[in-house]
Image (cartoon, coloured by chain):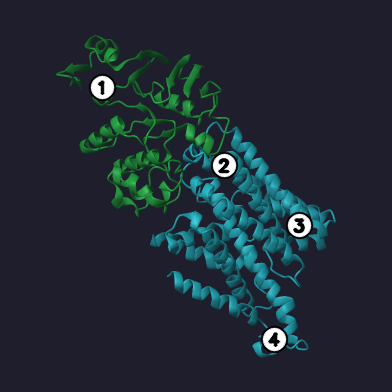
Amino acid sequence: MKTSILLLAFIVLIVAPFTGQIPISPAKLFDHSTMDHQIFFDIRLPRMLLAFFVGGILALGGLIFQTVFRNPMSTPFTLGVASGATLFTAIAIVLGFGGTSSLFAFVGAMLTVIILFMVASRFKTYDSSSLLLVGIALSFFYAAALMVMFYISNLQESYEIMRFTMGSLDIVGFENIYLLVLTSLFLLSLIQYYRYELRLLLTSYEFAYLKGVNVKKLNYILLFTVSLAVGVAVSLTGPIGFVGLIIPHILKSIYAESADKLIVPIFFYGGVFLVLCDLVGRNLGTVTDVPIGVVTSFLGAPFFIYLLIKR
Amino acid sequence: MLLKITDFSNQILTQITFELKSGQNLIILGSNGVGKTTLAKVLCGITPSGNVRIGNLDPSKIFGEKRAKLINYIPPKLEIFDEFMRVGEFLELGCFNHAITIDKALEILGITHLKEKTCRSLSSGESQLLLIASSLLHSANYTIFDEPTANLDPKKIQMLFSHFKESHFLQSKIIITHNLDFAYKLGFDILFLEDKRVKFHGASKDFFTQENLNKLYDKSVGKIENNIVVNL
């Protein structure tokens, strides 16, 4: 199973940039004067990299949230962090700061994490399902606030916000990719650095504490970094749900290893999954591409349910 | 190094004060719900209090290996969030005692065959042995065992007994138990909790007299031919 999905992943990564409404001939790829060259390097490759790194961040973010909040349903999406980023991006669009929407998305993500922490520290005993409920409540609140943004925005802004909430991988050139790659590397290396502590967190808070871990501080560091990365990802593509929930679960059931050993695989396959979803979305023969968020849920939900039944 | 708790009170316990010298052992007794586990969690700093000192350090205020080496707590049940963590991987966490290897610890407790199993798949007795193995690898100055015999079969209780009696891998042991015969045969000092307070703190031979047992256990416990038995 492990080798066959790895093979499949590489096929997806190789095929993806060459297929689309305009197929690209590998022979003309390095001829600078051709259209194929331009489409490949200015559009397809940046798009694939965007999909790959956003998918990786969302999947790994899901794993970390599940570990820290000790609930298999916790992800930056179910706890409202992504909705916070979305709302603040909408606010940026309405206020006319569309150009700095990344910053707003980041602020929205961080604000949500801070609220979650403040609420969690008020609980008499820590309880992951209560926190999940808080996250859901926050998501509803943000959804309502997003409606307000729609209500007060003009037609042009409304349209921009709506496209944003559907999730999109449209990108030209590499400017934003650098930021994304940098963010991904930072997230990956930080989590690798805390691997031992992460494995301790995978036992129990008490056990981790007894082995000397400053659990509270570690949780802050992990959540802050994930929220930063998710904020950057959401600001570039809009909210793409579900990747963070299903990829960690799928990888765990395929590998049957403790989560601290799956950091790189989860990032990698999260990326491949989004590239695959984009590949499907671009090649359905519709007039415009099917929004990425639609494809992830259509592909992911049935497969996820199948896996849960098979267990 | 001295473990000292001074005038600790909360909803469950009142004015708890005692000390335990390094290298000495203690058995904590008392009825269900009297606050033995609460006391254990205060001692090791899981419940921060400010009333505990080990050496001159407050265990709830410091972190890292320095803290871990002071005191360890072995709960009655193994709690693991991850589904797939294996026994061997679990034991790699917190090996502060380099005098003993993971394989040796597994061998001592007779659970070498479990090394590749996932922790979640163990029976309650097997998880208890795993926790005890982890305590050997951790080897803090003080180790608190919370009902270590609760899920063990008689042979394993024998093995654990001789281990508590002779092991040089553990330093000071604080043992919470309901197994009075086990406590009696170990012969360690006794701390008895009742009505939120320390009702008895002293030598084993003074605690296990029929008169004292009648008083503290309301005649439910008898001393017969040098065994402590529950009257049924």
Secondary structure under tag 4 reads loop
| Residue A69 image-quadrant placement | top right
Residue found at x 61% / y 40%: A217
In the depicted structure, whether residue B51 falls above or below residue A174: above
Task: Report the amino acid beneath label 4.
Answer: Leu
Chain for disc number 4: A
Q: Which residue does the numbered mark 4 point to in the structure image?
A: A29
Query: Dot 1 surroundings within 10 Å: few (below 14), some, or many (20 or more)?
Result: some
Query: Which one is closest to the eye, mark 1 or mark 4?
Result: 1
Per the model, the C-alpha gap separating discs 2 and 1 is: 46 Å
Q: Specify which label sits upstream in the sequence, 2 or 3.
A: 3
The residue marked by circle 2 belongs to what chain?
A
Chain A image colour: cyan
What kind of element bears circle 1?
helix
Q: Are marks 4 and 2 on the same chain?
A: yes
Q: CA distance from mark 1 to mark 3?
A: 68 Å
State whether residue A177 is above or below residue A95.
Answer: below
- Estimate the spatial distance between the alpha carbons at disc 3 and disc 4, rounded to whole Å: 33 Å
> Mark 2 to mark 3: distance in Å?
27 Å
Please name the amino acid that badge 3 sits on.
Ser
Q: Do tag 4 and tag 2 residues touch (Cβ < 8 Å)?
A: no
Mark on residue A102? 3
Instruction: Please report whichever mark, 3 or 4, sits nearer to the chain's N-terminal start.
Output: 4
Residue B184 is tagged as 1
Q: Position of residue A124 (x, y in %)?
A: 55, 31
Give the SS element for disc 2: helix
In this rendering, the answer to whether A62 lies above or below A45 is above
Estimate the spatial distance between the alpha carbons at disc 1 and disc 4, rounded to whole Å.
83 Å
